[in-house]
Image: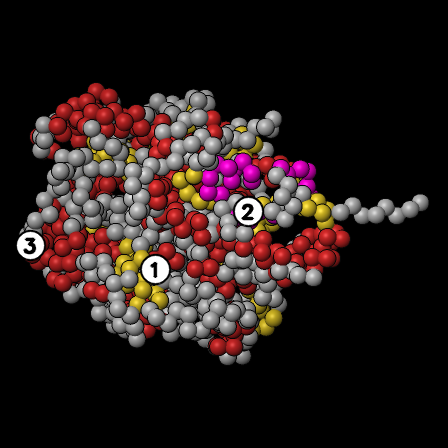
């Protein structure tokens, strides 16, 4: 069987598997925010960046190669990951204490995983809206990290294209498929795949936010690495 | 009440019909729709989405991506000042201030009567005849205060653009040194005839023998690219000419398209012959839109002459035609996979590679994307053979290279040299003196200090897409780097985290230093950001974005250090300015109503 | 030769734009407080009511920076403390007070002092004795250099205890195993 070396450990893989898929299947965690097993790789968050043959590549989008030597869980790569997390934290308004996703949020959980103690940089404090128009779902754009999981799930799984990104660069932002800009004026429902795929706290079902109390949530007691490997094995 | 330009329904149907209601042509449709009303009101986007049968959110996504598409009202006269460092060196900021004062408008805002808006834009490719502006998309160079006064008056009088003095819109070629390509006097079709005579394989052999490499900067072997596209599965192959010449300081493609368009189109047709493509696109940057009519005319002439269309030059099975696609202000579309996304009517976001465009490009078809100059150069190979082409230049960099020279020199313009020419020779030829540094290859390129001027223009030494900006001893290289950092922050597509946030953070640090609030800690953060951008970015834009800072920090470090007010730490923001609003609200100006941003040691 | 008794570390604490929740959490280290006072002594702190901070080994800052007085206090701490620690979400990120950052200052002040129901002829206070608010609430690392950060709203007693014991013992402090929380 073909294999590559991940931090010195042999990782078997099948043709067509990416570095990330093969690594996780073999019980080695490579982090991600924009990757989802039901969708094609996107490669935008860059948390899965690994070093292969000395070059930085996105593990989620790079096919595994026989005999390759890949570095992932090293102080250097984890330091870069922490830096990318810090960038995501300062770019949006991520105020965990008042967020109902706290404890289930993958961004926060990755902050814990990589021991991010400070967002380090100057906060951008952007002015972003909240859309409470929909009867069942609240949109809080303050927390958007532009992973496009909702965009892709709505388009590719739900067949609706409720979401899209507009703007460019640091002004990029999420919009919904209505001239009014209101979610209530789209055909979005709380049962859409896109309603249940946000890794952070942008797309929130109403009236259920605290059904599971803080302290008993996915990542309150478990590291996201452990949780992810458990889910995907 | 401010009056806004009319958002009344315009005849979108004509536009939609012209583009066959084809969603792939969404960007072209939006450009044409905007031409009718000056901007793109929300109902227009809704109408277009419905007519094309695509989600409105997608249309809004595309409309919001490109700098030259406006989803908010803009002036009936839209003045955009080119903001390359060479424009800044020629005083574009003073000219913009003057124009704004005369027209009672703030930069970036719409005047109250809806008449005019004034803002900056990335380099418009008139660096040899700047400072330059675009007025409603048309280029005007050689601005002076006198000309600004005249323009303000024309706008106040609401004089239609076609009644403005024609000499305003004259764009000069400024060709200063000719070599093989610029000296070529070729009747259209001669290169094609020669290539057809060699057969498709024989022609590709010649290109291989020439060892021609891409003139867009990356230097990929043209023959290898063409062969990959030819061998890729799929019969409907595509040729794309990348005329999205957005690299600050580069303008040689503008000159080729203006005065050598037949060579460019003939080169595209030569590529089609090698690869077996039937469809070609010229992706023309929005800033060069004024060239479109003459380019369309050239295409029409070539069709009439049997150089485009079916059975080109009577060769059965050689069918190929070219259409022009306009860009709309997005540097990232110079990256070939982003360019293809844009051609498909989408946001110009670089794709994941592999698959490479030669295998899966435009609409999933094998696509060869080449630079304007690369296409033109193939005419020389067809006419005189690959061996002859490889006789000039160096072993690894064959042929000649067009350089776009601007900045502190007596004779800015276009210079064609065989590869291998030393920097010193170029500086001598263009009349540069007391040169402190040269930025080769544009913002993404390399900054050379005077102790490196013995180096040569060549892929193996100093590679370049053609930009060559000269800075004499009076210039501050920190300002140069800062201008480029602003450029990258403006042009980042925002797809990947490191580039989207990193370019903005870097801009923040450079501005902090420029504003006199820099500390040693900021230099450490800058260097840390440089590394992360270089390592983790999705495409070349992000990984090149820190280049100007890395180079100048290494070679002109004192330009940074003399801006530091602390060897330790300075606040991330201007503390006293942060109290300004409260002072105004309370009408206080006592000492307690102020803060010193820089904390004196004596305190 | 006698072994010198190790000098007690001098610690100062304060709350800027905070709710004193982090200080309450500090007290939640319960019986460890007895161990702690063997190792440290307090300088300026709400626990001592000393008003000005003197030379210290460690400064703990709760709360973000929302006005000019916060800036002065924070700078005084930075000048006097060899090690400065941001304690809790507000000091680390701006926290709850920073939720006003998407509003303009004039909106905030007018709403409170002029347009609030029940207020008549109200005006925004302009007494020179009062500190002026900043346009935005900032985390403390945007105003002074900060050496360590303990996130959490509030950080738990055990997290604070772990961090301080690491620090006092000369180990680089780490928060792992559930001690690291942002909420």
Where is mark 3, residue-wise?
Answer: B14
The residue wearing badge 2 is C15
Whether discs 3 and 1 lie on one chain: the answer is: no
Q: Is residue B283 left or right of residue B33?
A: right
Is the C-beta separation of discs 2 and 1 under 8 Å?
no
Query: Which sits in the foreground, B416 or A91?
Result: A91
On the image, the x and y values in percent for residue C163 come to 65, 56
Task: Select label 2 or label 1 by which is in front.
Answer: 2
Q: Is residue A175 above or below residue C62?
A: below
Residue B439 quadrant:
top left
* Residue under numbered circle 1: A140
Q: Secondary structure at mark 3?
A: helix
In this picture, which residue range is highlighted in magenta? C52-74
Q: Where residue B476 sits: x, y (%)?
A: 45, 27
Image quarter of residue B74: top left
Quarter holding the N terminus of chain C is top right
Which residue of the protein is positioned furthest toward the right in this rendering?
C1
Asked if marks 2 and 3 fall on the same chain, the answer is no
B512 or B127, nearer to the observer: B512
For this rendering, which residue is in front, A201 or A52? A201
Quarter where residue A40 is shown: bottom left
User: Residue C92: percent from the left, percent from the top?
Assistant: 52, 50
Asked whether disc 3 touches disc 1, contact meaning CB atoms under 8 Å apart, the reply is: no
Q: Residue at x 54, y 66 (%)?
A: A68
For residue C150, above or below residue A4: above
Q: Is residue B92 left or right of residue A109?
A: left
CA distance for labels 2 and 3: 66 Å
Chain of residue at mark 3: B
CA gap, disc 3 and disc 1: 40 Å
Question: In the picture provided, is A51 more to the left or to the right than C98?
Answer: right
Residue under the point 62% across and 43% down = C49
């Amino acid at each position: 069987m073909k294999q590559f070396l991940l931090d010195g450990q042999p990782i078997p893989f099948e043709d067509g598997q990416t570095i990330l898929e093969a690594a996780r299947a073999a019980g080695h965690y490579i982090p991600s925010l924009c990757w989802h097993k039901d969708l094609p790789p996107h490669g935008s968050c860059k948390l899965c960046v690994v070093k292969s043959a000395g070059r930085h590549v996105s593990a989620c989008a790079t096919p595994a190669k026989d005999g390759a030597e890949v570095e992932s869980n090293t102080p250097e790569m984890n330091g870069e990951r922490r830096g990318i997390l810090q960038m995501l934290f300062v770019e949006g308004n991520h105020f965990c204490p008042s967020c109902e996703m706290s404890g289930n949020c993958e961004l926060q959980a990755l902050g814990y995983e990589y021991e991010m103690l400070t967002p380090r940089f100057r906060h951008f404090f952007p002015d972003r809206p909240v859309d409470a128009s929909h009867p069942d779902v609240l949109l809080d754009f303050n927390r958007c990290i532009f992973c496009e999981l909702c965009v892709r799930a709505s388009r590719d799984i739900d067949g609706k294209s409720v979401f899209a990104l507009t703007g460019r660069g640091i002004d990029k932002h999420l919009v919904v498929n209505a001239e009014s800009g209101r979610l209530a004026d789209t055909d979005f429902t709380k049962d859409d795949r896109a309603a249940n795929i946000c890794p952070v706290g942008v797309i929130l079902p109403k009236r259920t936010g605290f059904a599971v109390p803080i302290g008993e949530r996915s990542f309150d007691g478990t590291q996201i690495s452990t949780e992810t490997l458990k889910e995907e094995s | 009440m401010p009056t806004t330009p009319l958002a009344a329904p315009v005849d979108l149907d004509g536009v939609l019909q012209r583009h066959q209601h084809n969603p792939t042509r969404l960007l072209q449709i939006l450009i044409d729709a905007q031409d009718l009303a000056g901007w793109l009101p929300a109902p227009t986007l809704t109408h277009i989405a419905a007519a094309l049968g695509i989600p409105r959110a997608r249309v809004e996504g595309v409309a919001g991506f490109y700098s030259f598409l406006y989803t908010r009202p803009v002036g009936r006269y839209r003045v955009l000042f080119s903001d390359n460092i060479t424009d800044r060196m020629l005083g574009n900021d003073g000219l913009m201030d003057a124009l704004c004062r005369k027209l009672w408008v703030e930069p970036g805002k719409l005047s109250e009567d809806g008449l005019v808006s004034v803002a900056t834009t990335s380099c418009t490719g008139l660096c040899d005849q700047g400072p330059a502006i675009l007025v409603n998309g048309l280029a005007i160079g050689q601005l002076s205060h006198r000309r600004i006064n005249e323009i303000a008056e024309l706008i106040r009088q609401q004089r239609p653009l076609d009644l403005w003095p024609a000499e305003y819109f004259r764009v000069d070629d400024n060709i200063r040194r000719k070599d093989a390509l610029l000296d070529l006097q070729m009747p259209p079709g001669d290169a094609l005839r020669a290539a057809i005579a060699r057969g498709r394989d024989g022609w590709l052999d010649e290109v291989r023998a020439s060892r021609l490499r891409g003139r867009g900067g990356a230097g990929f072997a043209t023959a290898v690219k063409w062969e990959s596209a030819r061998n890729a599965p799929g019969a409907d192959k595509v040729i794309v000419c990348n005329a999205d010449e957005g690299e600050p300081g580069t303008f040689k493609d503008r000159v080729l398209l203006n005065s050598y368009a037949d060579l460019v189109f003939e080169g595209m047709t030569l590529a089609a012959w090698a690869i077996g493509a039937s469809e070609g696109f010229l992706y023309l940057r929005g800033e060069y839109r004024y060239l479109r009519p003459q380019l369309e005319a050239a295409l029409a002439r070539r069709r009439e002459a049997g150089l485009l269309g079916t059975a080109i030059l009577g060769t059965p099975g050689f069918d190929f035609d070219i259409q022009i696609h306009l860009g709309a202000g997005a540097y990232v579309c110079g990256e070939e996979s982003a360019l293809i996304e844009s051609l498909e009517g989408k946001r110009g976001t670089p794709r994941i590679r592999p698959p490479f465009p030669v295998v899966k490009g435009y609409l999933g078809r094998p696509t060869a994307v080449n630079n304007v100059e690369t296409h033109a150069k193939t005419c020389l190979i067809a006419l005189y053979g690959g061996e002859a082409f490889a006789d000039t230049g160096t072993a690894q960099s064959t042929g000649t290279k067009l350089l776009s020279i601007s900045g502190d020199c007596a004779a800015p313009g276009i210079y064609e040299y065989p590869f291998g020419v030393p920097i010193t020779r170029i500086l001598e030829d263009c009349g540069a003196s007391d040169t402190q540094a040269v930025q080769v290859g544009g913002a993404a390129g390399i900054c050379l200090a005077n102790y490196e001027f013995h180096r040569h223009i060549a892929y193996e030494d100093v590679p370049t897409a053609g930009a060559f900006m000269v800075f004499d001893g009076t210039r501050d290289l920190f300002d140069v780097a800062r201008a480029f950092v602003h450029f990258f922050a403006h042009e980042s597509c925002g797809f990947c985290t490191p580039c989207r946030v990193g370019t903005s953070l870097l801009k923040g640090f450079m501005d902090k230093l420029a504003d006199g609030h820099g500390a040693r800690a900021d230099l450490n953060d800058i260097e840390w950001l440089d590394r992360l951008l270089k390592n983790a970015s999705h495409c070349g834009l992000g990984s090149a974005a820190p280049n100007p800072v890395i180079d100048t920090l290494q070679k002109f470090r004192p330009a940074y250090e003399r801006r530091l007010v602390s060897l330790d730490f300075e606040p991330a923001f201007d503390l006293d300015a942060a109290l300004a609003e409260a002072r105004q609200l309370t009408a206080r100006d006592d000492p307690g109503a102020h803060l010193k941003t820089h904390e004196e040691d004596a305190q | 030769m006698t072994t010198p008794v190790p000098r007690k570390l001098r610690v100062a604490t304060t709350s800027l734009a905070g709710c004193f929740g982090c200080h309450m959490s500090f007290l939640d280290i319960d019986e460890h407080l007895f161990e702690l006072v063997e190792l440290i002594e307090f300088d300026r702190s709400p626990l001592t009511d000393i008003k000005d901070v003197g030379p210290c080994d460690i400064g703990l800052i709760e709360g973000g920076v929302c006005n000019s007085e916060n800036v002065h206090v924070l700078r005084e701490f930075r000048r006097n403390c060899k090690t400065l620690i941001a304690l809790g979400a507000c000091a680390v990120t701006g926290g709850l007070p920073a939720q006003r950052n998407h509003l303009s200052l004039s909106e905030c002040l007018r709403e409170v002092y002029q347009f609030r129901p029940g207020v008549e002829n109200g005006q925004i206070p302009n007494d020179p004795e009062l500190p002026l608010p900043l346009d935005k609430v900032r985390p403390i690392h945007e105003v002074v250099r900060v050496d360590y950060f303990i996130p959490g709203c509030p950080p738990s007693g055990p997290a604070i205890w772990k961090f301080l014991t690491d620090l006092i013992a000369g180990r680089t402090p780490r928060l792992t195993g559930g001690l690291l929380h942002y909420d």
